[in-house]
Image: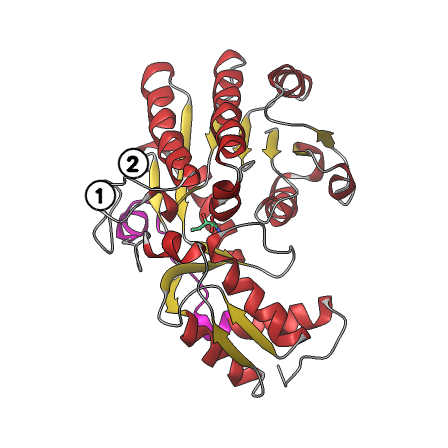
Amino acid sequence: MKILVTGATGQIGSELVPELRKKYGDENVIATGRNIKKLKEFSEPTEVLDVLNKKKLEQVVKEHNIDVIYHLAAILSAKGEQNPQLCFKVNVDGLYNVLETARENNVEKVIIPSSIAAFGPETPDNPSEITIQRPKTMYGISKVLAELLGEYYYNKYGLDVRGVRFPGIISWKTEPGGGTTDYAVEAFYAAIQKGHYTYFVRKDTVLPMMYMPDALKALIQIAEAEPSQLRYRFYNVTGMSFSAEELTKVIQKFIPDFTADYKPDERQKIADSWPTRIDDSAAREDWNWKPDWDLERMARDMIENLSKKLRGDAYGKA
Ligand code: VAH
């Protein structure tokens, strides 16, 4: 099976490519992206690819005889609000290029990460798969479109589009990439490097989050699920919900001198428009989804690995 990953140098892609290569063989997973320097960090096969270049996308799909596309290339919520027009181009035009190229070239499956950002302030808390969305960010709107277009291409053309709605994803291998949930990653960097972090959200801000190993597990599990198992095309998945203050407290268990303060900025409005938790019972029932990481275990792993990556000892004892 030949797999193409778009946006391979991003937060998820940087870790999904090695995971998929372990499972299917390096030669069967083509890592693609615009960032040539970061792309070079992967072994071959790689391709420089901007999803806005449909001609190049088609050439790569044909040359490598692609069966499955993991379409990760996107601009995230906070960065998207700084340039909504670019966010539309990348997230919508790019998506359309991928769906059309897949349809025209008999690609079997397209896997797309959606997000809790597909929900909005009118969404009741703990939403299911079919709860009202009405997001207020360009990123969130583009993710609702991805879900609806994915369903359309499945029903109209039989293109097997499927995905999961991710909460904030926490990881240590890549720097935060312009998401509203970046504070949950930045806090760990700051705790190790400076001993203090100023959150850009209130201390009582609660959002659903997930550790990267669980995110990779969810993506690959939904990709491999039998069609008969899927009552939806896009499923909610989550790991844990916690407040900024709870994150500070759990970091202090490993780095006792760590201190924090909370100065909300424009990203608070985005965070407040999202649910504090999401119902992932359908994924649990339909394809045996279950997270492996809780807040304390994740914090320990983040601090141990980030301390090594930053080449310093942990500020405290990990
Ligand atoms: C963002 N990390 O903050 C992404 C994610 C749930 C949020 O989609 O935009």
The answer to whether any part of residue 302 appears in the image is: no
Packing grade of label 1 (10 A; few <14, some 14-19, many >=20) is few
Residue 299 part of the magenta-drawn span: no
In front here: 287 or 182? 182
Residue drawn at the location 43% of the way across and 70% of the way down: 244
Q: Is residue 64 above or below residue 193?
A: above
The answer to whether any part of residue 114 appears in the image is: yes
Packing grade of label 2 (10 A; few <14, some 14-19, many >=20) is some
- Check disc 2 and report its element: helix, strand or loop: loop
**Of the two numbered discs 2 and 1 in the rendering, the one whose residue sits closer to the viewer:** 1
Which quarter shows the C terminus?
A: bottom right
Q: Which residue is mark 2?
A: 232
Find the distance from the CA under tag 2 to the CA under tag 1: 13 Å
- Check disc 1 and report its element: helix, strand or loop: loop
Q: Going from the N terminus, do you reach mark 2 or mark 1 first?
A: 1
In front here: 228 or 35? 35
Which quarter shows the N terminus?
A: top right
In the rendering, at what x and y percent does residue 117 appear? 38, 46
Residue 291 part of the magenta-drawn span: yes
Magenta segment: 280-298
Is the residue marked 2 within 8 Å of ligand 1, measured from its CB? no
Question: Which residue type carries mark 2?
Answer: Tyr
Q: Is residue 264 above or below residue 101?
A: below
In the rendering, at what x and y percent does residue 148 appear? 33, 28
Q: Which residue is mark 1?
A: 131
What's the coloring here?
secondary structure
